[in-house]
Amino acid sequence: MEKRGVGAAGVGPRVIGRLTPELISRSPQYMSCVNQYELDLRGCRIATIENLGATENQFDSIDFSDNAVVRLEGFPKLPRLSALYLNNNRISRIAQQLEDAIPRLEWLILTNNKLTNLVDLEPLQTLPRLKYLSLIDNPVTKQPGYRLFMINRCKKLKVLDFRKVKDAEREEAKKMFEGQNAPAPTVATFEPEEELAAATGKKAGGEGEPSIRKGPTPEQVMAIKAAIAAASTLDEVRRLEDALTTGQLPSELLGNGAGAEEMEEG
């Protein structure tokens, strides 16, 4: 396959490590077999997606395979981008509002990453053109109802894990998750600092009771955060998030504050 652009021979060695404008300019760029202009960033030990503004929105696809990316985030506005290949990374979190940066994304290959819970996948439902998705060899694929959950959340999916989505599966997913099709809440990807701020903000609100109603103590907040990190279902995560903002702890967490504080210090 003919190499094109500044990644051609004679430019010099690729810079391995951070995703810098120099690494982008020195990496292979070519027309793929599916007629997409592609940027090849495979095997560069990249841990963070950054500096993609240097691509100047020239690419239809970007290949991040065989790196060390831990979060799917950091994209500037790339309205041309339609395919991302991120197999064999360490991704465990997906950022909210990806649709603002990559609205035309149709292909997303996340094979062999670290996504664990169904709630981790919620941000994908806002990608308006997502049709081809692979999550093979992620722990989340072993969660009960995983396939139907994704079919219900991502309405345009045609192929999931290299298996065509059938009309019967769409109907089954619709029945299973009926009444649960609201957009993903902003707390689906848990951010402890935001939740703590929300909890303390509610404590200060209300006329005539400025400081009588108390939110959770710092120890209780740590206990809830630990429980959310260990949660395996979306309902469990939402129940714990409600406890974080209301200060009404589930019975199983009462008295666990000290243990959470010790875990934080460790």
Image (cartoon, grey):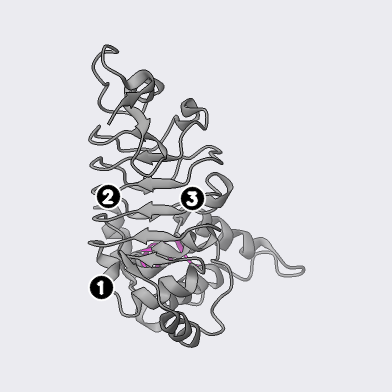
| Left or right of residue 259, residue 75 in this image | right
| Residue at point 44%, 29% (across, down) | 51
State how far apart marks 3 and 1 are (Cα): 26 Å
Above or below, comparing residue 79 to residue 172 in the picture: above
Q: Which residue is label 2 attached to?
A: 87
- Label 3 amino acid? Leu
| Residue at point 45%, 56% (across, down) | 192
Res. 142 mark: 1
Give coordinates of residue 159: x percent, y percent: 38, 65
State how far apart marks 1 and 2 are (Cα): 18 Å
Residue in front for this viewpoint, 166 or 190: 166
**Magenta segment, which residues?**
216-225
Residue in front for this viewpoint, 41 or 210: 41
Secondary structure type for disc 3: loop
Q: Earlier in the sequence, mark 3 or mark 1?
A: 3
Magenta: main secondary structure equals helix
Give coordinates of residue 123: x percent, y percent: 48, 59
Foreground mark, 3 or 1, reads: 3
Residue 29, quarter of the rendered image:
top left
Secondary structure type for disc 2: loop
Residue 73, quarter of the rendered image:
top left
- Label 1 amino acid? Lys
Q: Which residue is label 3 attached to?
A: 105
Residue 223, quarter of the rendered image:
bottom left
219 within the magenta span = yes
Above or below, comparing residue 10 to residue 75 in the picture: above
| Left or right of residue 200, residue 227 in this image | left
| Left or right of residue 232, residue 218 in this image | right
